[in-house]
Amino acid sequence: MAKVGLFFGSDEGNTEFIAQRIRKRLGAEVVDVHDIADVTQLEFTQYDNVILGIPTWDFGQIQSDWEEFWDDLAEVDFSDKTVALFGLGDQFGYGDYFLDAMGMMHEVIAASNPHRVGYWSTEGYEYEASKAEEDGQFVGLAIDEDQQENLSAERLDRWCEQIHREFGLDTPLQLGD
């Protein structure tokens, strides 16, 4: 069975909470969850399928643990991996920078040319600008726990169904919270 490595950074716990909800949906026996504050580049070598989760802080800033790992992230070879991203942001409070950190992460990992999956529609979001938007869609799942928390469960269900297919997983999904 192909394992999935899910790596996240979280200061206030929202991104960690979303990571655990993804793990529950895809299966605890399939997904290993790692706080980026506690890993090295070597942990990435264990997985063919990788999920990276990052919140955007304030005016388009990278979460602190990811910021410390940023140079290491650029050195990880994702060329033989399938990678999906999810990001958290506040589309109304910081609409000019919505999910910018996820967009910056996408740019960094794209350098090693992984198979990228998990792209997500921009429909249902209201924001001014985002570095995470490419060709009319987000480069990963967009979560807004500040303004649209009531939509997170449905979005997680749909995205997990999508990446379950895109990762080629054969385990049952457990949708809902």
Image: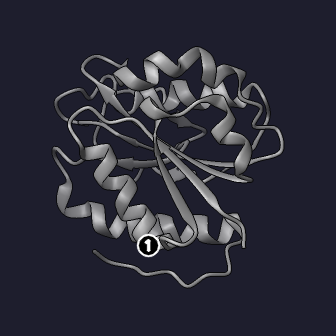
- Residue 130 appears anywhere in the view: no
* 11 in relation to 22, above or below: above
* Drawn side of residue 20 relative to residue 111, left or right: left
Image quarter hosting the N terminus: bottom right
Q: Secondary structure at mark 1?
A: helix
Q: Quadrant of the C terminus?
A: bottom left
Q: What is the residue that sits farthest to the right in this orientation?
A: 80
Quarter where residue 3 is shown: bottom right
- Residue displayed at 21% across by 48% down: 145
Q: Residues within 10 Å of mark 1 (few under 14, many from 20)?
A: many
Task: Please say whether residue 56 is visible from this viewpoint.
Answer: yes
On the image, which quarter does residue 19 sit in? Answer: bottom left
- Toward the bottom, the furthest residue is 172
> Who's the residue at 50% across and 67% down the image?
160
- Residue 24 rendering spot, x and y as whole percentages: 40, 70
Q: Position of residue 156 (x, y in %)?
A: 39, 64
Residue 72 located left or right of residue 18? right
Q: Nearer the viewer, residue 78 or 148?
A: 78
Residue placed at 32% from the left, 77% from the top? 176
Q: Which residue is mark 1?
A: 25
91 over 125 or under it: above or below: above
Depth order, front residue of 113/125: 113
Q: Amino acid at mark 1?
A: Arg
Q: Residue at x 35, y 63 (%)?
A: 21
Determine whether 82 is above or below 78 in the image.
below
Q: How is the image coloured?
A: one colour
On screen, residue 93 versus residue 174, left or right, reads left
